[in-house]
Image (cartoon, rainbow, N blue to C red):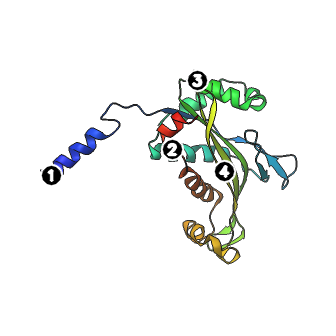
């Protein structure tokens, strides 16, 4: 009987059972910042952080958008607007509005869908590995950041940053943990992006803290 009692307790104290609604969130397709010259610095249009610009492979913004959707859904912190609905809404807007007024345009788009929050991702570099998992002539190199805005007041409440060119353990013994989290092998650019996104999302606060942050 104690097993059934425990199960009843878990179910009745879950947010869903208590009728508590999760905050809603939209995720924009990743935007890109290429910079004037490859290899030179490029600025994030939101936080003004500096990254080394580089190659951005075709389709890579969509890859990061898909990864972020998958990982936010797994966290179960938010009720996530589907990629299909977001892409449909995004396609109805003039792309130049986002180029000229990125934050206000994204906030307005999120509010039109009655969302509570919106994630805005910026991709600066997505360079593919040349070689194999056991030996790379050129390692994967990825740089992106993610910004979360609360739509009721337009305030940025969280941001995450990832900027890495994979290196062998012999070059940095202080990052042995990261080396093994990367499977002790040379990753593809998508694999490196996925690992990096996991690392920065571990620092994402819970919904209550995000809703109450001044």
Instruction: Single out the residue that lies furthest toward the front.
Output: 214
Q: Does the rendering let one see residue 81? A: no
- List x then y, in percent, for residue 26: 56, 33
Q: How packed is label 1: few (under 14 Cα within 10 Å), some, or many (20 or more)?
A: few
Q: Earlier in the sequence, mark 1 or mark 3?
A: 1
> Horizontally, is 42 left or right of 59 in the view?
right
SS under mark 1 = helix
Compared to residue 113, the image places residue 63 above or below, namely below
Q: What residue is at 83 percent from the left and 46 percent from the top?
A: 35
Q: Which of the 4 image quadrants contains residue 134?
A: bottom right
Q: Secondary structure at mark 4?
A: strand
Q: CA distance from mark 2 to mark 1?
A: 34 Å
Label 4, label 2: how far apart the Cα atoms are? 16 Å
Closer to the chain start, of discs 4 and 1, is 1
Q: Residues within 10 Å of mark 2 (few under 14, many from 20)?
A: some
Calculate the distance from the C-alpha at mark 4 to the C-alpha at mark 1. Answer: 46 Å
Q: Which mark is residue 161?
A: 4
Q: Is residue 3 left or right of residue 96?
A: left
N-terminal-most mark, 3 or 2: 2
Q: Bin the neighbour count of mark 4 within 10 Å (Cα to Cα): few under 14, some 14-19, many 20 and up.
A: some
The residue at which mark 1 appears reads as: 2
């Amino acid at each position: 009987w104690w097993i059934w009692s425990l199960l009843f307790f878990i179910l009745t104290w879950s947010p869903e059972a208590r009728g508590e609604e999760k905050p809603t969130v939209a995720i924009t397709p990743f935007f890109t910042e290429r910079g004037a010259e490859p290899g030179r610095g490029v600025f994030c249009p939101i936080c003004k952080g500096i990254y080394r610009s580089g190659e951005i492979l075709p389709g890579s913004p969509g890859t990061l958008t898909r990864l972020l959707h998958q990982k936010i859904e797994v966290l179960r912190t938010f009720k996530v607007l589907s990629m299909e609905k977001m892409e449909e809404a995004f396609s109805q807007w003039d792309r130049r509005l986002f180029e000229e007024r990125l934050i206000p345009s994204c906030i307005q788009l999120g509010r039109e869908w009655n969302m509570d929050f919106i994630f805005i991702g910026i991709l600066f570099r997505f360079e593919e590995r040349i070689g194999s998992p056991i030996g790379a002539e050129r390692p994967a190199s990825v740089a992106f950041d993610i910004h979360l805005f609360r739509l009721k007041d337009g305030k940025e409440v969280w941001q995450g940053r990832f900027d890495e060119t994979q290196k062998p353990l012999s070059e940095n013994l202080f990052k042995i943990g990261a080396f093994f989290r990367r499977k002790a092998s040379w990753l593809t650019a998508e694999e490196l992006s996925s690992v990096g996104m996991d690392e920065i999302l571990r620092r994402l606060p819970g919904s209550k803290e995000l809703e109450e942050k001044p």
